C-alpha cells in the first residue's frame, strides 16, 4: 500500500515539473554531449576541480548527445526509469549509483539487482554523472541555503553565521511538526530534546554533521537540523548537553530528505548555465517508515 | 584490584580464548587513572554523561564502554578543550574518580560476537541462529511490518526505521552490530543493524531491489539499540573470570524519540 502511494505522489510531482518546463523557450535541438555539459559545469562551479574526487561519469558514454538533464539526490532504478521516460538521458546524481562510495560494484558485480540496473542504463543509453564534492564545496553551503529556503527561513539567517537561522521563538514540538510537513518526512525523523522547550536559533546541517563545527555552532544554536548525524559523534554530544545543564535539541531527518532541496537548487543552477537543454529535478520520498507506526 | 589489573585479566582471558591483544586498537583507557582501585564495573554501549552519573550512583567507578566517550572514534580531545559540555563531563569524571576503558575491537573478536548475540537474545532469535552462517537467523515466515513491530516492542526502541515493502514476506534475517549493517544480497530477505550511511549501500539497494521485482527489507535499530544489549553479554563474560568484583550492565539507552 505504502509504496503505491509514494509512486503516485512522485508521478504527480514529476508531471508538474514537466509541465513547468514546457514554458522554457529553446531554439534548435541542442547537440551538446554529456561531456560538454560536464565541461560547462566544471567551468562554472567556482571550485577548483580536485584530483581525487568521487565526482565523475559512473555509467554510459560521455560522447552521448544529451536530450535532457535530470538531477536527483540518488539515481535509483526508479529515478532512472522516470528520467528515461521523460527523455532526460543525462542523470546527475548527488549520491552513488552502485551501492558503494566509489561506485565499484565489488561483490555485487554478479548481483541480480545490480545487473538489472546496469542493463537498464545500457538499454536506454543513459549517462550517469556524479556531482557531489564540488557542488557541496560551494560557499555558502548550497544544501543548507536550499534546505532553509524550503522551510521558509530564507530571511532568518544570522548574518555573522553561515548556517544558523533565527526563527520567531517557538517550541521544539511545533518546530518538529513544521519540519515534518514541509520536508514530507515519513519514518526518517528522529529527535533529541523535549517538545515543550523553547527554541529560536537553528543550526541547519544537511548531509553529514561534523563534530567540531557543530560544537561551535551550538554555542549560538538551540537546535541542530541534521541529515545523517553519526551516532557515536554528534548524537551522544547532544545527549550530553542535557547532563551539562545546557540542553540542546536535534532533529535528524535523514541524508536523502536533508539533501533534496539542495539538489533541486542544483537543477536550477545547471539550467542557468546550460539554457539549451531542459533540466529537471526528480524528487525522491523519505525511504523510511517507522517501526512503531 | 586496580582498573589496570582488570584489563590485564581481560587480556589474559582473551589470550586463552585465542585472541591476541592488538597493537593498533581503540581499546584503551579514555579517562581516569588506571591504578584506581575498582569498587565495581559497569559495562555499557556508550559512556554518555547520563550513563556516567548512573554508574557513579550505583557505586561502579570503572566503566567499560563499547563506543567512545568523547564524540569521535579515537576519542581525540583536540578542539574539545574549551567546550562547556566536554569540560563538565571531564569534571564529573575527575570529581567521582571514575575510570573509563573502551572495549570495542576485542569484543567484536570474540566468538560468537557478543554484540550480535546480545541483540539476538533480546530479539528472541537465539534459537533461530543458522548453524552454518554467522549472523544469519532463519525465522518462521512473517511480514516485514510484523517483524518490525515485534523488534520495536522487544527492544523498546523509540526510533526504529524500516525500508522496504511492509507486506513483503520475510524469513531469512542477517543481523549486524552497530555500523556493521550486513550488505543486502540475494541469499537473505532483511538486513538488521544499528546505523548505516544512507548512501552507497543498502538504502538504495532496497529501493532498486523493489524496482527490479526482488523485495528486500532493512531495519535500522539505531546504534545503541543495536549494541547496548551486547554489553550485557560482556558483563556475563567478565563475571566468569572476575568473581570478586561487582559487575553490572548499565545500558546507555535509546537516545532518540520519534514524535508525531
Image: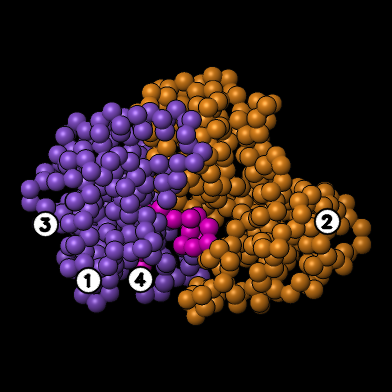
Chain colours: A orange, B purple
Q: Which residues are magenta?
A: B189-204
Question: In the rendered image, which residue does mark 3 sit on?
Answer: B241
Question: In the rendered image, which residue does mark 2 sit on?
Answer: A43
Label 4 secondary element:
loop
Q: Can you tell which of label 3 and label 2 is closer to the viewer?
A: 3
> Residue at 28% across / 41% down in the picture?
B33
Question: In the rendered image, which residue does mark 1 sit on?
Answer: B18
Q: Position of residue B185 (x, y in %)?
A: 41, 72
Marks 1 & 3, CB-CB < 8 Å contact: no
Using a 10 Å C-alpha cutoff, classify the residue at mark 2 as few (fewer than 14 neighbours), some (14 to 19) or many (20 or more): few
Marks 3 & 2, CB-CB < 8 Å contact: no
**Subunit of label 3:** B
Using a 10 Å C-alpha cutoff, classify the residue at mark 1 as few (fewer than 14 neighbours), some (14 to 19) or many (20 or more): few
Q: Is residue B190 magenta?
A: yes
Label 3, label 4: how far apart the Cα atoms are:
38 Å
Left/right of residue A241 with respect to residue A94 in the rendered view: left
- Do callouts 4 and 1 point to residues on the same chain? yes
Marks 4 & 2, CB-CB < 8 Å contact: no
- Do callouts 3 and 2 point to residues on the same chain? no
Label 1, label 3: how far apart the Cα atoms are:
16 Å
Amino acid at each position: 500500500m505504502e509504496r503505491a502511494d509514494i509512486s503516485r505522489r512522485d508521478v504527480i510531482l514529476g508531471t508538474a515539473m514537466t509541465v513547468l518546463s514546457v514554458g522554457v523557450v529553446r531554439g534548435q535541438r541542442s547537440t551538446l554531449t554529456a561531456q560538454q555539459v560536464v565541461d560547462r559545469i566544471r567551468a562554472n562551479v567556482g571550485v577548483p576541480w580536485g584530483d581525487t574526487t568521487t565526482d565523475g561519469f559512473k555509467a554510459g558514454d560521455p560522447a552521448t548527445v544529451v536530450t535532457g538533464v535530470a538531477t536527483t539526490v540518488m539515481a535509483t532504478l526508479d529515478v532512472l526509469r522516470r528520467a528515461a521516460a521523460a527523455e532526460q538521458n543525462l542523470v546527475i546524481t548527488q549520491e552513488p549509483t552502485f551501492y558503494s562510495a566509489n561506485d565499484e560494484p565489488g561483490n555485487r558485480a554478479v548481483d541480480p539487482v545490480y545487473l538489472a540496473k546496469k542493463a537498464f542504463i545500457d538499454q536506454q543509453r543513459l549517462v550517469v554523472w556524479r556531482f557531489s564534492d564540488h557542488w557541496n564545496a560551494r560557499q555558502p553551503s548550497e544544501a543548507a541555503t536550499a534546505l532553509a529556503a524550503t522551510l521558509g527561513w530564507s530571511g532568518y539567517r544570522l548574518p555573522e553565521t553561515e548556517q544558523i537561522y533565527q526563527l520567531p521563538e517557538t517550541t521544539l514540538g511545533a518546530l518538529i511538526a513544521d519540519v515534518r510537513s514541509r520536508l514530507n518526512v515519513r519514518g526518517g525523523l528522529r529527535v533529541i530534546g523535549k517538545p515543550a522547550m523553547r527554541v529560536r536559533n537553528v543550526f541547519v546541517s544537511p548531509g553529514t554533521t561534523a563534530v567540531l563545527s557543530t560544537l561551535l555552532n551550538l554555542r549560538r544554536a538551540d537546535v541542530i537540523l541534521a541529515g545523517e548525524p553519526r551516532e557515536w559523534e554528534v548524537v551522544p554530544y547532544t545527549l550530553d548537553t542535557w547532563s551539562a545543564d545546557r540542553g540542546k535539541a536535534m532533529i535528524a531527518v535523514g541524508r536523502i530528505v536533508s539533501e533534496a532541496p539542495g539538489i533541486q537548487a542544483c537543477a536550477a543552477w545547471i539550467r542557468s548555465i546550460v539554457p539549451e537543454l531542459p533540466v529537471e529535478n526528480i524528487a525522491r520520498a523519505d525511504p523510511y517508515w517507522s517501526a512503531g507506526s | 584490584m586496580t582498573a589496570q589489573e582488570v584489563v590485564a585479566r581481560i587480556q589474559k582471558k582473551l589470550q586463552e580464548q585465542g585472541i591476541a591483544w592488538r597493537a593498533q586498537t581503540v581499546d584503551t583507557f579514555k579517562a581516569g587513572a588506571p591504578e584506581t582501585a575498582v569498587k565495581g564495573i559497569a559495562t555499557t554501549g556508550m559512556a554518555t554523561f547520563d550513563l556516567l552519573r548512573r554508574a557513579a550512583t550505583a557505586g561502579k567507578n570503572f566503566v567499560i564502554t563499547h563506543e567512545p566517550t568523547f564524540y569521535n572514534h579515537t576519542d581525540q580531545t583536540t578542539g574539545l578543550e574549551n567546550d562547556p559540555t566536554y569540560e563538565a563531563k571531564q569534571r564529573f569524571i575527575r570529581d567521582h574518580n571514575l575510570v573509563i576503558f573502551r572495549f570495542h575491537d576485542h569484543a567484536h573478536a570474540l566468538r560468537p560476537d557478543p554484540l550480535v548475540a546480545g541483540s539476538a537474545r533480546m530479539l528472541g532469535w537465539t534459537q533461530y541462529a543458522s548453524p552454518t552462517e554467522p549472523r544469519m537467523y532463519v525465522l518462521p515466515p512473517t511480514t516485514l511490518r510484523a517483524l518490525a513491530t515485534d523488534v520495536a516492542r522487544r527492544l523498546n526502541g523509540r526510533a526504529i526505521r524500516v525500508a522496504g515493502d511492509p507486506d513483503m514476506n520475510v524469513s531469512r534475517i542477517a543481523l549486524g552490530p552497530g555500523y556493521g549493517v550486513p550488505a543486502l544480497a540475494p541469499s537473505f530477505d532483511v538486513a538488521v543493524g544499528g546505523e548505516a550511511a544512507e548512501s552507497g549501500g543498502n538504502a538504495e539497494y532496497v529501493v532498486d531491489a523493489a524496482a527490479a521485482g526482488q523485495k528486500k527489507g532493512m531495519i535500522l535499530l539505531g546504534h545503541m539499540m543495536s549494541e547496548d544489549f551486547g554489553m550485557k553479554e560482556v558483563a556475563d563474560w567478565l563475571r566468569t573470570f572476575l568473581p570478586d568484583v561487582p559487575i553490572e550492565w548499565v545500558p546507555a539507552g535509546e537516545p532518540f524519540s520519534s514524535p508525531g
